[in-house]
Image (cartoon, rainbow, N blue to C red):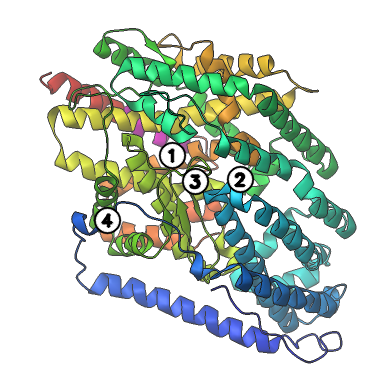
Amino acid sequence: MAKDFTTSNEDTQTKNINTEELLRGEILMQKSEIDKDQKSLISSKNKKIKLIEKKALPESLEFNLDALFKDEKELENFAKELDIKLQEFNDAYAGKLSMLQADDFSNALQVYDSLSEGLGAIMTYVFLKFAVDSKTYGALYADYELKCNAMYAKVMFFELEFADLDSVKMNEFIAKNDKYSFFLQNIEATKKYKLSLKEEQILLNVAPVGVDAFSRLFDESFANMRFKGVVDDEKIGEEEILGFLHVDDRKLRKLAQKNFTKGLRKNSHLLTYILNMVRKDVAITQKLRGYEKPESFRHISNQTTQASVDSMIDCVNANMQLVHGYYRVKAQFLGHKLKDYDRYAPLGLTKNGKKTKVEFQDALYDTLESFYNFSPRFYEIAKEAVFNGWIDSHPKPTKRGGAFSHGSVPSAHPYVMLNFTGNRRDAFTIAHELGHAIHQELSKIQGTLNHDTPLTTAETASVFAEMLLFDSMKKTLKGKELLEIYAGKIEDIFSTLFRQIVMTNFERAIHEKEGELKSEDFDKIWLDENKKMFGNSVYLTKKYAKWWSYIPHFIHSPFYCYAYSYGQLLVLALFGLYKRSEDKEKFIQTYIDFLSAGGSKSPRDLILTFGFDVNESAFWEIGMNEVKNLLKEFEDLLNSTKL
């Protein structure tokens, strides 16, 4: 379960470090977790681990949330106790940070880390409940969002007061807290965008009825949305119908596109309104906090610079012709002009039938095997995820669409939500999300405040895991089967790299415009930006114009998408380095250290350990050259394979 924050009976107002009882328990727990993880790393190297047999793997998986709370009653009791702790912390330290000695501040900082974890445990539990069953648990999620915001308001002063300390005091505190130095330095670096404590508390309290409410409305709407079936008239969900874009039968792909678009059009007014509300929120936030651009807040959160992001986006935009060339070859191979519903069509070389089905056990085994061959530690974490309730694998009637890995809190473990439907892409999604989970599990030794990583490096482990799976599959296949896998991987990279920049370009365009936009305005901008990616190699139909409206990142995390491209180019560079490395064990250990650091260092400093500097525009060309190499390998294989 989540950590139990024991209370002290003494008066915390008169004695700042009456939190010592809590602190001692917290330090011992953190040390125990670190020791346990370090021992696990050592044991992974020293013992011979056997790869599990495929038949021993489950056919489906569901969450077990006991690592957080056993039930809602335990959640309720924990929340009440935590609320008392937060008030005690407020009484002890609010308005007093400037008067603390360095040791006292260190005590306060560690308790703040622990209390933050408690809030995180509550919100993780209710969010996961909501994600799996939005209809049943929507109210629970909303209630605890309000409660946790009210509780967090009691400790919100801490970071704001730290940012206002004089430089001498601030540097003294930072020097005393090496583990949290980057976290503290980042507070100082972003203080110009902060408002007063009262203003921040007001914004926090109204957030659940502001843009967060529209985010929830979007999720609940899609979770309950049903589309006319493709094989029969039975209504199916978003994940199932999009899965038909990957089947051999072109008529089924076209019908899936038609029925999905019909559902989007039916909900067009609602989805247009929600996106307009997000645009307004971004504009208001930019004005209130003084951000230079609508997207500036995301770069600050990602701990990167506008110049670095611009150079990466420029690099991708300048290489869109790689996409054009590939799809022209694919059109020749399939023997017809490609339309948008043909983008993910199989080459049809290995299997016949209306739907090429990948079994969950097979997909899961392939991922575990690829991790096993790379690092025993990777394999052990992924195996634990499979057998200990970390994963919810298949679609359900009111389950949220898509896939994610939630880092949860250090005292528990990550949770991976999938919507496995059996298409080839789903196999790589398993690797992707388990890559995230491995990253999150390794980095929890850093504590709550350093646990999360910026999006720019958060996507590294996930995309690297996909490359491990691809590399593993290449070794076991040849001829036509290998050609299919190459084509699929190239299309995945295009989706992760080029398509995400198309989405970023779309967001830049819609957030630059003033006033509300009509659905037709979004349609036009969406088509215009996508045409740059495909040129004349793929014909984008009028139906595809509406497909901006189901992208969740536009609603939940504006300007998130470029992080995928950032991660893809970074991983391609890293994976190329790994494959060329003469000392692979050294690379693997450096990579594990990189992941284990979590958010305790800047992305640039972490990546510098591999000899790459993301602030240099030439860096992005390294990853892009790996894309070109992959396309060349595909071309050579195509020319050498007897079809």
Q: Is residue 175 above or below residue 277?
A: below
Tag 2: residue type?
Thr
Quadrant, the C terminus: top left
Q: Is residue 286 left or right of residue 365?
A: right
Rendering coords of residue 131 (x, y %): 55, 49
Q: Secondary structure at mark 2?
A: loop
Q: Position of residue 197 (x, y in %)?
A: 86, 59
Residue carrying label 3: 613
Q: Which residue is mark 4?
A: 374
Measure how far apart labels 3 and 4 are at the Cα level.
25 Å
The residue mark sitting in front, 4 or 2, is 4
The magenta segment is: 618-629
Which amino acid, mark 3?
Answer: Asp
Q: Residue at x 40, y 20 (%)?
A: 323
Q: Tell me the distance, in whole angstroms, between the alpha carbons under discs 4 and 1.
A: 19 Å
Along the horizontal axis of the image, is 214 left or right of 403? right
Q: Which residue is mark 2?
A: 304
